[in-house]
Image (cartoon, rainbow, N blue to C red):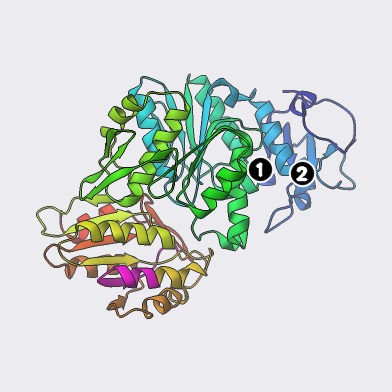
Amino acid sequence: MYLNELLKDVEIIEVRGEGNPNITGVHYNSLEVKEGGLFVAIEGFKTDGHKYVNSAVQKGAKAVVCTKFTEGTDVIQIKVPDSRIAEAKISSNFFGNPSSKFKLIGITGTNGKTTVTYLVKHILDSFGYKTGLIGTNQNIIGDRVLETGRTTPDSFELQKLFYEMAQSGMDYVIMEVSSHALELSRVYGCEYEVGAFTNLTQDHLDFHETMDNYAAAKEKLFSLSKEAVINADDIYGIKMADNCSCPCITYGVNADADLKASDVVLGRSGVEFELDAIGFSLSIPGGFSVYNALCAVGICKSLGFDLNKICDALRTACGVKGRAEVVDTGNSDFTVMIDYAHTPDGVENILKTARGFAKGRVVVVFGCGGDRDSAKRPIMGRIAGELADFCVVTSDNPRTEEPMSIIKMVEAGVKETDTPYVVIESRYDAIKYALDNAQKDDVIILAGKGHETYQILNSGTIHFDEREVIKEIMNL
């Protein structure tokens, strides 16, 4: 595609150089630039892409989008107010604005995004539509499953994915929209048929710094949406609903919401509730499953589908890998669950779920990730201590941090309670300890890893699938 076509509707301050080269690709990483590419120089948090303009040109870049000019560069330079916004628009232009060829649904929030996307996909699939999914666990195009690197891809990767979905004839695409993606303009220019908000609890404050900033980032989704679906039981959700400029459906259990669940029944095998005199059920345990179901119902109702048909479809939905996932432990007399809980709210939810059906002890194996919001570590430790009968504090993804320094911060929170605990740095050994010491009717929660099949250590990434670990330890 020629440069002038790529720059359609892009706000430009000044252009240096002349010509209209044919552009073969769009790159923000100079190492990935190929002959004929367009390099977008972004001032990032760790480095400034403008330092690598000459390197990109040497690798074959025919033009550069920037927020400041680089002297001595003999290719066309296009100065823009915001490189991230420019990249998003250019990427959409490169692939022919692919998201306009299907109905796009976005879900944001701290917890529940993944489950809600799968629930909505299941409902739409059951209605006979072709659906795509973009999220934390995986990306799905019809029956094709693709690995994913981050919750919401970079704008060029996202538009490429949209293009593949459009080419495959998707009717709907349901995607998780992270606060980072909204704050960093990765989804700039996307128009969502429905944007939904699940909840907001402490996470990512290493990036957003304050909860208000975190909420403001999430709220940006509704400026890109035709309709909104918002959790009215969440304090930030109430504010978002009040500020919402598009038509909005609220949902909740306690608040006066448009979709209000009543007669809620929580069980080991799932939840039941009544909504508008219709009996709903979902085979995923936990009070949070009521909220996830309500969010999915609200989205599908906003799309114009009948409530009774949504109810029928929801009854056949199953759980999501790594979300309150019960693991096969053979003929053992205890239960093991794997859950992605990696925030204070997530830990609280899964432990309350276990507490709701456990006949024996609730044992939790957990840690906190490194290079992330450190303030939540003692909070998670305290919540685990308050709700579990025994805690095994271990590593999660320590990344570049020393595991024991993270563990000590978590341990400080556990110590605020009277709950017995042990510290075992090796996650494998921690799981083995929990399984070896399991008692009849115990519920053992492995929290934090969820769907992940790896562990990120300061020495690199290793394969680590907790399902495989359980099988190995129990000789299954």
Residue 424 vs residue 300: left or right?
A: left
Residue found 57% across the figure and 46% down from its top: 240
From the viewer's perspective, is residue 286 above or below residue 376? above
Residue 261 vs residue 180: left or right?
A: left
User: Dividing the picture into quarters, in which one does residue 119 lie?
Assistant: top left
Residue found 39% across the figure and 77% down from its top: 411
User: Would you say residue 261 sits in the magenta stretch?
Assistant: no
* Secondary structure category for the residue under label 1: loop
Which label was assigned to residue 185?
Answer: 1
Q: Are marks 1 and 2 in contact (CB under 8 Å)?
A: yes
Camera-side residue of 439 and 58: 439
Camera-side residue of 323 and 210: 210
Camera-side residue of 46 and 268: 268
Which label was assigned to residue 275?
Answer: none
Camera-side residue of 180 and 110: 110
Q: Which residue is mark 2?
A: 82
From the viewer's perspective, is residue 201 above or below residue 6? below
From the viewer's perspective, is residue 124 above or below residue 182? above
Outermost residue, front direction? 256
